[in-house]
Image (cartoon, rainbow, N blue to C red):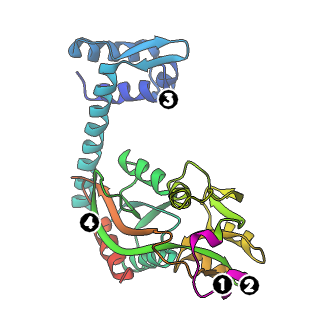
């Protein structure tokens, strides 16, 4: 088997058919078909089956594709490491981070890195934590800054602990209360992420555990942009935000709600693929993230 056959197999899986994959690769369909047949001959099993919508992986094919993706990532890591040895610290660093991470931590560290490394280039992706980790697993990011789950397949360097809080406009009547219970928030309007997002599920579960109906959001968002907190200004809506994050720049304040009522404590860390090559730029940014998290 030729090493490029791995790329061909992965392209067929990505595009769902020989024709589309051949066009994307810039090779002929017969050449791509022969490459698939070469690999299947060595494997002794069919890797794809034809369907009405194109080609899908068989059970054996899915297992093979999983290993092929890891091989490709290892190869790419090897090339990056050789490039780093040859050129020093020059290169592109791809960083993903969750919108709920305080902007001062991420942007402050990136600003200092750019001052220290004038030739360094950054590609930043601000996505929901689940999407960031998917990109990291696929090799499209070098590192991610996100909440750390109890069980994870990534290498983790912890940065800090924080928690999310319920926030309201600074003129909201509930801010004048000394202490609140979750029941006091049951009949309020909310600005919340969509139901499939983990944070929303945590909030709904906390209400249900106390025999309360889950909040019914007046506004549902994907939390991809904290500028949406501006919608809350001058309203009676409640939402969830980082206690020291961007929401406070929109005139929002944290409600006096005990953590026992709604426990949204988190551990924030730098995540990388286990065993992946980390360039000098990635190592330096990690160190700067530690400093700016202090």
Label 3 – label 2 distance at C-alpha: 56 Å
Label 4 – label 3 distance at C-alpha: 33 Å
Depth check, front residue: 210 or 171: 210
Determine the residue positioned at 58% across, 76% down.
246
Q: Which circle marks residue 24 in the picture?
A: 3
First in sequence: mark 3 vs mark 2: 3
Q: Is residue 269 above or below residue 209?
A: below
Label 2 – label 4 distance at C-alpha: 54 Å
Query: Which quarter of the picture shows residue 12?
Result: top left
Which mark's residue is nearer the viewer, 1 or 2?
Answer: 1
First in sequence: mark 2 vs mark 4: 4
Q: Is residue 215 above or below residue 168?
A: above
First in sequence: mark 4 vs mark 3: 3
Horizontal side of residue 187 vs 207, given as left or right: right
Q: Is residue 70 magenta?
A: no
Label 1 – label 3 distance at C-alpha: 57 Å
Residue wearing tag 4: 88
Residue wearing tag 2: 171
First in sequence: mark 1 vs mark 4: 4
- Residue 249 location (% of width, % of height): 63, 81
Which mark's residue is nearer the viewer, 2 or 4?
Answer: 2
- Residue 80 location (% of width, % of height): 28, 53
Q: Residue furthest front?
A: 211
Q: On the rendered image, what quadrant is the N terminus found in? A: top left
What SS does tag 4 mark?
A: loop
Depth check, front residue: 146 or 6: 146
What SS does tag 3 mark?
A: helix
Q: Which circle marks residue 175 in the picture?
A: 1
What SS does tag 2 mark?
A: loop
Report the magenta residues as a range. Answer: 171-184
* Labels 3 & 2 near each other (Cβ < 8 A): no
């Amino acid at each position: 088997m030729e090493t490029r056959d791995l790329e061909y197999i992965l392209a067929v899986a990505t595009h769902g058919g020989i024709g589309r994959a051949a066009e994307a690769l810039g090779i002929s369909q017969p050449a791509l078909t022969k490459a698939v047949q070469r690999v299947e001959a060595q494997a002794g099993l069919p890797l794809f089956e034809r369907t009405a919508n194109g080609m899908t992986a068989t059970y054996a094919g899915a297992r093979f594709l999983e290993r092929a993706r890891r091989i490709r990532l290892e190869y790419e890591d090897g090339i990056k490491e050789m490039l780093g040895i040859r050129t020093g610290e020059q290169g592109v660093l791809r960083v993903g981070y969750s919108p709920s991470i305080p902007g001062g931590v991420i942007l402050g560290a990136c600003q200092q890195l750019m001052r220290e490394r004038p030739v360094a280039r950054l590609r930043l992706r601000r996505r929901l934590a689940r999407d960031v980790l998917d990109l990291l697993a696929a090799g499209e990011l070098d590192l991610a800054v996100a909440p750390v789950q109890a069980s994870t397949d990534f290498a983790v360097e912890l940065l800090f602990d924080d928690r999310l809080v319920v926030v309201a406009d600074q003129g909201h009547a509930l801010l004048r209360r000394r202490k609140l219970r979750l029941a006091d928030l049951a009949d309020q309007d909310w600005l919340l992420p969509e139901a499939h997002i983990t944070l929303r599920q945590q909030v709904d579960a906390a209400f249900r555990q106390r025999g309360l109906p889950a909040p019914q959001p007046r506004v549902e968002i994907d939390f991809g942009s904290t500028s949406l907190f501006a919608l809350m200004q001058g309203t009676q809506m409640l939402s969830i935000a980082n206690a020291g994050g961007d929401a406070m720049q929109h005139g929002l304040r944290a409600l006096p709600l005990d953590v026992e009522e709604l426990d949204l404590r988190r551990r924030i860390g730098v995540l990388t693929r286990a065993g992946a090559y980390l360039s000098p730029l990635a190592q330096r940014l990690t160190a700067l993230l530690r400093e700016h998290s202090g």
